[in-house]
Image (cartoon, grey):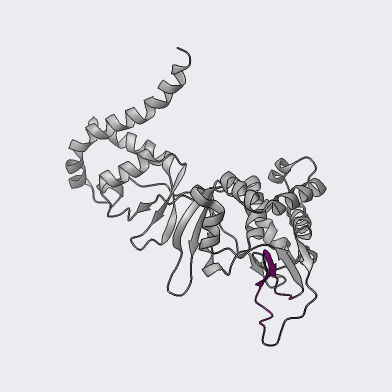
Amino acid sequence: MDIWIPLLQELVWPITVLLILFFLRKYIPQLVERTTKIGAMGIELEFETAKEFSSPWSNEYVGDIRIGVKSNDFSSGVMDLMDQFSKEGSYDYASIDLYGGKAWLTSRLYIFSTILSKARGIHYWVFVDSHDSLHKKFIGYVDSSSLRMQLSDRFPELCRAYSEALLAVCPEGDTCLKQADSWKITQLVQHFLKGIQKEYPQQAGPGADPHAAQEIEKGWALLKDQTTLEKARFLDINELREICGEWIRTDVLRSVETASMEYLAEKILLSNEQLIPQVDSENWFLDMVDVVQAKKALIKKGRDAAK
């Protein structure tokens, strides 16, 4: 009997919600007539958006830390960028714009997503793409633990480099990242990069763009200094899908302002995630919605309408 109790407890929530929605249906027309505020499901229901972490990722001293900056340069020049990694407070998600496969190295995604998930509590990573006429076109989203696991499986050398860097900087383990200052985080990234970089003695050929990083050897990317190779790949849509596979999720709330009650209720109530992305009619990413809060709001509206 004891083994059935947890199962019954898990079933109480969805059954309760479905019953409330069933009784809510006959009140929807009256609610719509009394509603002047446009909201989800045609009634006064606002979704609570999640808190996004954003970063400039570059400064005038070292350039873009997502694709450039060799280990020796990753020091005091990046301190202002690392400040936001070490500040107090937590975030729900961060968005990664691939910019047509030119904005991120897999190695930088690994180290920064690992640190931010530990230091700032980020749960989800939303991937979008902007290039030509596209602007933040939604690709999918992955939870932090799955992203790290998939990156580690595909690039074990990154996992080894991180473990060695962590042992050198934070021997007590990555739990220290919650209290780490910007200098300690800077040192951690520097040690990590040292473990995956090597010198590339050949000089760039005539006409080469000195500011553009490129993949010069299989599995190695040439940084903009044209002398440093990093064990990484440029992250485009195909690479992302190969890395994440079935772990990348694509469920979204689409066109919330005009969506039907049935559509939104189904998306919210059947979601097993803490957050779900919201996109517009053209699949442009807008933000992430707090699913737990939305479920509670649905129940409250159902109770209020039934009174």
Residue 9 % position (x, y): 42, 23
| Relative depth, front residue between 32 and 168 | 168
Q: Is 135 drawn above or below residue 3 in the view shown?
A: below
Residue drawn at (70%, 54%) of the image: 158
Q: Is residue 200 visible?
A: yes
The quarter of the picture where the N terminus appears is top left
Residue drawn at (70%, 74%) of the image: 224
Residue 123 % position (x, y): 55, 46
**What type of secondary structure mainly makes up the magenta span?**
loop
In the image as oriented, which residue stretches furthest toward the front?
A: 218
In the image as oriented, which residue stretches furthest toward the bottom?
A: 206
| Relative depth, front residue between 227 and 171 | 227
How many badges with numbers are in the image?
0
Residue 280 % position (x, y): 36, 59
Q: Is residue 87 visible?
A: no
In the image as oriented, which residue stretches furthest toward the top?
A: 1
Residue 278 covered by magenta stretch: no
Q: Is 104 drawn above or below residue 11 in the view shown?
A: below
Q: Which residues are magenta?
A: 208-226
Left or right: 73 in relation to 156: right
Residue 188 % position (x, y): 76, 53
Q: Is 99 drawn above or below residue 242 in the view shown?
A: below
Q: Is 3 drawn above or below residue 47 in the view shown?
A: above
The quarter of the picture where the C terminus appears is top left
Residue drawn at (17%, 46%) of the image: 33
Residue 210 covered by magenta stretch: yes
